[in-house]
Image (cartoon, rainbow, N blue to C red):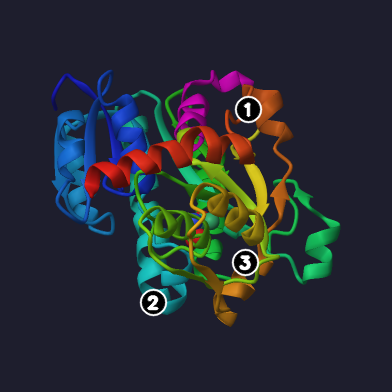
Amino acid sequence: MENDVYSLITGANGEVGHGLVKKIGNSKKIIGLGLTDLDEDLKPFVSVYIKGDITDQKLISEIFTKYKIDTVFHLAAVLSTTGEKVPKLAHDVNVNGTFNLLNMANDQARSQKRVIKLIFPSSIAVYGMPNLETKKQHPKVKEGEFLNPITMYGINKLYCENLGVYFSSHFSQLAIHNHYLDFRCLRFPGLISAETVPSGGTSDYAPEMLHAAAQGKSYSCFVREDSTIHFMAMPDAVDALLLLTNVPKNKLSQNIYNVRGFSASAKQIEEIVKKHFPNADISYRINPERQKIIDSWTEDVDGSKAIDDWGWKAKFDFNKAFEEYLIPAIKIKYTNNS
Ligand code: AKB
């Protein structure tokens, strides 16, 4: 095994991967794992890139045997809309892939007598509001409430949260030493990045609307204009991951945290997009399956535990996210690309 210490980032080429790799790549050695070739702009920040699949147990075992890894950021996932189209694939990647990593990281931590952190972004998809009336009545849901997900992705995330708690808090009790898997999880809302457009998620209408407007393309939103869920600007998402990673363990009163960004309806997003791109052509054509998923997700979350335990505060509320991050950055992106 090499002496260097690495962070392993699964899904390094994905949306959150882009932000995270660039943020930590200058100070930490990164092993990136992904299904596709590493994007050119990430190459300077990644020490080792492995093109492969997290469901490949042999590959995961080889990575942990060859490299000394102290932190795993497990970002790879099949998101909610794709998960409904190919539930078996979603289950394989989201559950079996996560199990492989947890199991391997746990084995390594115990056999090498050290702590390995595994940071797991879960999702608001773990929630399942039974109807719109209940959703309105309970806008700020706590971590333990309404855990009745209706999507394969939400079910997978909720189960893997529990698996992580099992490996870090229960399985390790059987060991007589302090070397363990330190599982830390946050539940992300819909993320909006100026750099990348997501694919396969159901919260995607927000970033899609914005990116389409910035490129002068028409956009047909697949949920009603009153649809309201919780979102976060990508730089805040990356900061939340790192803050949770670095907080001393004794400050954490639980493994799983809601992290608040801002709540917004599709109409509010349309309005702010049109304020900055007055020619934006945005219409609504409802997709009933995707609408049902959005209706089942909470309007907002109660993020007080993350505030109390590790001082989380998003830099970007709704206005700031658009006015100070998304709109300026996206204008530069598409001007440079045109
Ligand atoms: C999705 O829409 O599936 C994701 C999520 C909210 O976790 N963006």
Between tags 3 and 2, which lies in front?
3
Question: Who is closer to the viewer here, 244 or 160?
Answer: 244
For this view, does 130 lie left or right of residue 105? right
Q: Does the residue labelled 3 lie within 8 Å of ligand 1?
A: no
Q: How far apart are marks 3 and 1 (CA)?
A: 25 Å
Secondary structure at badge 1 equals loop
Magenta-tinted stretch: 236-251
Q: Distance between the residues labelled 3 and 2?
A: 19 Å
Tell whether position 245 is magenta. Answer: yes
Q: Hey, what amino acid is under mark 3? A: Ile
Reading the image, the residue beneath label 1 is: 313
Q: Is the magenta stretch mostly helix, strand or loop?
A: helix
* Residue at the (18%, 45%) spot, across then down: 39
Secondary structure at badge 2 equals loop
Reading the image, the residue beneath label 2 is: 86
Reading the image, the residue beneath label 3 is: 294
Question: Who is closer to the viewer here, 62 or 27?
Answer: 27
* Residue at the (42%, 78%) spot, across then down: 85
Secondary structure at badge 3 equals helix
The quarter of the picture where the N terminus appears is top left
First in residue order: circle 3 vs circle 1: 3
Q: Hey, what amino acid is under mark 1? A: Lys
Q: Position of residue 249 (x, y in %)?
A: 55, 22
For this view, does 238 lie left or right of residue 301? left
